[in-house]
Image: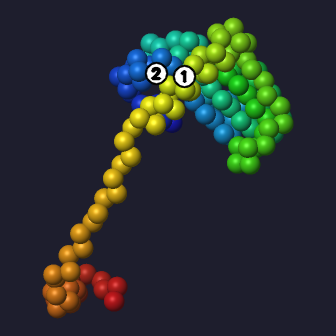
Amino acid sequence: MMAEMILGDEATLKAQLQTRGFLTLQEPASGAGGMIIAAAHVLADAGINYQQALHVTAIDVDRRCAHMTFLQLALLHIPAVVIQGNALTLETVETWCTPAHILGGWSRRLRRQQPVSDAEQLLMPQPKPIQQKHNTDVPEQHVEQAISKGIQEGQMSLF
């Protein structure tokens, strides 16, 4: 259920696949890989081959959890890089690539995709700051009248 909420509906997934060619999933606290497996099931239910359309980067501090994640993702043939390390401090102890990552040529695919997304970010115009207009024309007596009217109608006063 959580994976469905995070990934979105079938139409959204297919639109993202058409624009980028694949999806990336980052899991900073992978545990045994349950959320990753759930995401793969959501893709499979949508008729998308997760073995070709999904790449995962899974991180966990605990060595045992990183091993569990690697084992499960390798058995399901999910392309992934599993890192034993700290996602907050960016410390890396060990890194493992699943067989699906190596056999699918994902290192090359990810390198090819990265410059494209960086270039798109450089070409996008910078958003202009929104200037909010403050209405200073309202006299304070109107505010006081609104507060007293609310109190008369049974609304609790904060002031």
Residues at badges 2 and 1 in contact (C-beta under 8 Å)? Answer: yes
| Res. 99 image quadrant | top right
Taking depth in this image into account, of 152 and 14 the one nearest to the observer is 14
Front-most of 64 and 140? 140
Give the SS element for disc 2.
Answer: helix
Residue drawn at 50 percent across, 25 percent down: 116
Disc 1 is placed on an element classified as helix
Image quadrant occupied by the C terminus = bottom left
In the rendered image, residue 31, in percent from the top left (x then y), is placed at 71, 36
Residue drawn at 67 percent across, 22 percent down: 80
Q: Return the mark for residue 20.
A: 2
Q: Which mark is residue 67?
A: none
Q: Amino acid at mark 1?
A: Gln
Q: Would you identify the image quadrant in which residue 81 lies? A: top right
> Which is nearer the N-term, disc 2 or disc 1?
2
Where does residue 14 sit, x and y in percent of width and height?
Answer: 40, 19
Whether residue 152 appears in this view of the structure is no
Q: Which label was assigned to residue 113?
A: 1
Label 2 Cα neighbours within 10 Å, binned few <14 / some 14-19 / many ≥20: few
Q: Position of residue 74 (x, y in %)?
A: 72, 16
Mark 2 or mark 1: which is in front? 1
Residue pictured at 51% horizontal, 19% vertical: 22
What colouring does the structure picture have? rainbow
Residue type, label 2? Arg
**Is 118 above or below relative to 133?**
above
Foreground pick, 118 / 90: 118
